[in-house]
Every structure is written in structure tokens, then in C-alpha cells.
């Protein structure tokens, strides 16, 4: 991605508690800005095995990334309607 001059990853998808979190953390430690789309990730219900229900997993992930910081990195969730693609940085909005 660095050869393509990618500097920011906008992350949405499935398995909030695995794929989404891993991708976000991986992006930050590799020097990328990490922007989770707060209303565009989901997960399966694993509550029968002791995990919180999906809505709580999603809410916790959004809360964590709303307060996550890293030197020289822009991190923080945005809603779908606030995602900006291209050369301009994504804007964050209080959720």
C-alpha cells in the first residue's frame, strides 16, 4: 500500500471483534491513519459462549476507537455519511 501512497484506511465489514479490530490495530502500528465506519461493521452473536451480544461488541469498538490515539496518526470513527475518500482526510464527528 505504501507504494500506492495510501495513508489512511477506512474500515467497514464483518466480525467487529476479530477482523475489524485486527485491521484497525494493524493499520495504526504500520503507520496508517485508521478510520472505522461506526455504522458499517457487524459481528455474529457469540453470547452463548460468554461473549457480549453484537450490539455491545459494536458499541465498545466504536467507543474504544473514539478515544484511541497514536503519535502522528489520525484515528477515530465516522458514520457512513461522513466518510470522505480520496486525498482529503476523513472528518470525525461526535457520535
Image: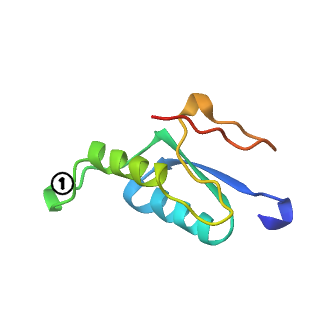
- Picture residue at 49% right of the left edge, 58% below the top: 68
Q: Nearer the viewer, residue 1 or 24?
A: 24
Q: Position of residue 75 (x, y in %)?
A: 58, 53
Q: Position of residue 26 (x, y in %)?
A: 57, 68
Quarter of the image for residue 30 reads: bottom right
> Could you classify mark 1 by the number of other residues whose Cα lies within 10 Å: few (under 14), some (14-19), or many (20 or more)?
few
Please tell me how many numbered marks the rendered image carries. 1
> Which of the image's four quarters has the N terminus?
bottom right
Q: Nearer the viewer, residue 84 or 45?
A: 84
Q: Is residue 1 left or right of residue 10?
A: right
- Picture residue at 70% right of the left edge, 36% below the top: 84
Q: Is residue 36 left or right of residue 51?
A: right
Q: Position of residue 16 (x, y in %)?
A: 41, 53
Label 1 sits on a secondary structure element that is: helix
Q: Is residue 35 left or right of residue 2?
A: left
- Picture residue at 34% right of the left edge, 45% below the top: 59
Here the colouring is rainbow
Q: Nearer the viewer, residue 19 or 26?
A: 26
- Picture residue at 52% right of the left edge, 44% below the top: 77
> Which of the image's four quarters has the C terminus?
top left
Quarter of the image for residue 28 reads: bottom right
Mark 1 — residue? 47
Quarter of the image for residue 90 reads: top right
Q: Which residue lies most toward the top here?
A: 81
Q: Which residue lies most toward the bottom here?
A: 29
Amino acid at each position: 500500500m505504501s507504494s500506492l501512497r495510501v495513508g489512511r484506511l477506512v474500515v467497514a465489514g464483518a466480525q467487529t471483534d476479530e477482523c475489524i479490530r485486527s485491521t484497525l490495530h494493524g493499520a495504526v502500528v504500520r503507520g496508517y491513519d485508521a478510520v472505522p465506519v461506526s455504522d458499517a461493521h457487524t459481528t455474529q452473536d457469540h453470547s452463548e459462549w460468554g461473549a457480549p451480544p453484537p450490539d455491545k461488541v459494536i458499541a465498545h469498538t466504536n467507543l474504544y476507537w473514539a478515544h484511541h490515539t497514536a503519535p502522528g496518526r489520525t484515528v477515530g470513527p465516522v458514520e457512513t455519511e461522513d466518510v470522505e475518500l480520496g486525498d482529503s482526510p476523513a472528518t470525525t464527528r461526535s457520535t
